[in-house]
Image (tube, coloured by chain):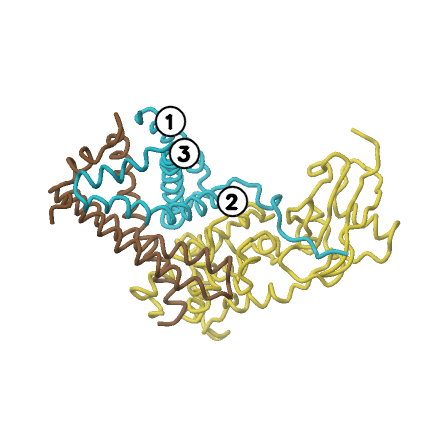
Chain colours: A cyan, B yellow, C brown
Amino acid sequence: MSSRPTLDYRAKSHLSYFAYACHRYSGLLLACFIPLHFLMLSQSLRGMQGFEKSLALTDVWVFKFGEWALVILLAVHLTGGLRLLMIEFGPWRGLRKGWIQLTILFAIACGLLFLYFAN
Amino acid sequence: MSNADLKVRVWRGSQEGEFVEYLVPRNPNQTVLDVVTYIQRKLDPTLSYRFACRVGMCGSCAMTVNGVARWTCRTHVSQILQGDALEIAPLNNLPVIKDLATDMREFFNKWKGAVGFFKGNQTRHDDFAKVEPNSEERQLANAGIECIGCGVCYASCEVVESRPNYLGPAALNRAWTLTNDVRDVQQLERMRAVAGDAGCHACHTQGSCTEACPKSIEPTASIAGLKKLIAKAAVRGSKWGKL
Amino acid sequence: MSTGVLQAKLWYAQRISAMVLGICVAIHLLIIFYAIRGGLSAQEILGRTQGNVLFAIFYEVFVIACFVHAPIGVANILQEIFPKSGLAEPLSWILALLILILGTTAVVGVFTGGQI
């Protein structure tokens, strides 16, 4: 005896749901990151030396990976968000699947650009 | 094409129960409704399920097939078969009465809750209302009026699952068509009904409703229309008054 | 204000701030790619931002848009995952204050470079 079945991954295996999930989780992670980002930048109040010392703390590999991931999350959330604005405020043209493809490509592009420009 | 029998798992019970497996002979041009009918007639007469027209017009036969809400009379087994196996369950998000039949009262109550019904102020003694068929409002209404209340969109929506009060895609779609009906006189009440936590702003544009609708109606579009209308009404007022 | 009107206004505010953020984030991404070339140092950052009124205004607008946009989004998520906990409103307000206060502090910091 078990409980009646509920919505599972099979009901959610479509592109629009995937876009929603990416947008929600990228937003949540960014929301957690932003206060830390501001805290780090406010170390600039210590003057150039103090700021430089705080920045040096982030020279660890794990921070660099985090920065790369965050740029990608930002790209995902931005493009996914623009898609939502098109759906909610623009003329109706379906679920804007082209925008989802654009989101994926733009996120990859940002990830690669970050690796290219960072030393 | 294999000649092996289909292995069909069917939900038996109500809120508590289990999947029972039946072996059903394969036929060409077999729909999932044919499969359920075979089981009930030949294998287990205690199976409960709903159907009516069996030709894709009434929406009564909606069930969850391999995890996705569909009209079983319009779903060919060959379309969705996974190997030899098929899984048939009642529609999600609705209480189960027995086996494959769900209690649709909350679905229709929410339709009422969204003021998804028409009320005019003319009588038989007045002239016909003149509604311009090419007007923007009429075209917006026409895009959504073919809904027959089958419940597939409601059963596919994760927001319905996580917010028990959420009116759901069908009710909101109907409300939107009536918002665009120039003869209706309840617009202010309707706007109030579809605002709020239970209303249109809870929609996250997941799009499962639009993907699932067997009549290709797009509730996501209707809900987007309501979101804009309600936001404007809350901030600046609408032609029917301020929220 | 009725709950319906409140929800509608929150939705509207979040979408308007989203439009502002769309522009701010696009510009910020360009700045990020420009700035990280050859590594990032305090000297380089402050060299660009110290005394730069345009940057200060841009980033303060950015901070205010975040202050509106993020807490409303987080409140929705909390309300859906923990519906009866009553956590959604207080936690969102805490996030809002953190963003506004730490963000403005950061803008002041990079504008003044510590020379207040």
Which residue shows up at 58% across the image and 49% down it? Answer: B213
Q: Quadrant of the N terminus of chain B?
A: top right
Going from N to C along the chain, the mark reached first, 2 or 1, is 2
Above or below, B85 relative to B206:
above
Residue B81 at x, y = what percent?
Answer: 72, 37
Task: Measure the alpha-carbon separation of dots 3 and 2.
Answer: 16 Å
Q: Amino acid at mark 3?
A: Leu
Residue C18 at x, y = what percent?
Answer: 32, 49
Q: Nearer the viewer, mark 1 or mark 3?
A: 1
Q: Quadrant of the C terminus of chain B?
A: bottom left
Q: Nearer the viewer, residue B166 or C67?
A: C67
Q: Nearer the viewer, residue B72 or B198?
A: B198
Q: Amino acid at mark 2?
A: Tyr
Residue C46, located in which quarter of the rendered image?
A: top left
Which residue shows up at 57% across the image and 45% down it? Answer: A12
**Residue at the disc numbered 3:** A102
Q: Nearer the viewer, mark 2 or mark 1?
A: 1
Left/right of residue B228 with respect to residue B104 in the rendered view: left
**Residue at the disc numbered 1:** A112
Q: Which mark, residue B173?
A: none
Q: Residues within 10 Å of mark 2 (few under 14, many from 20)?
A: some
The subunit carrying tag 1 is A
The subunit carrying tag 2 is A
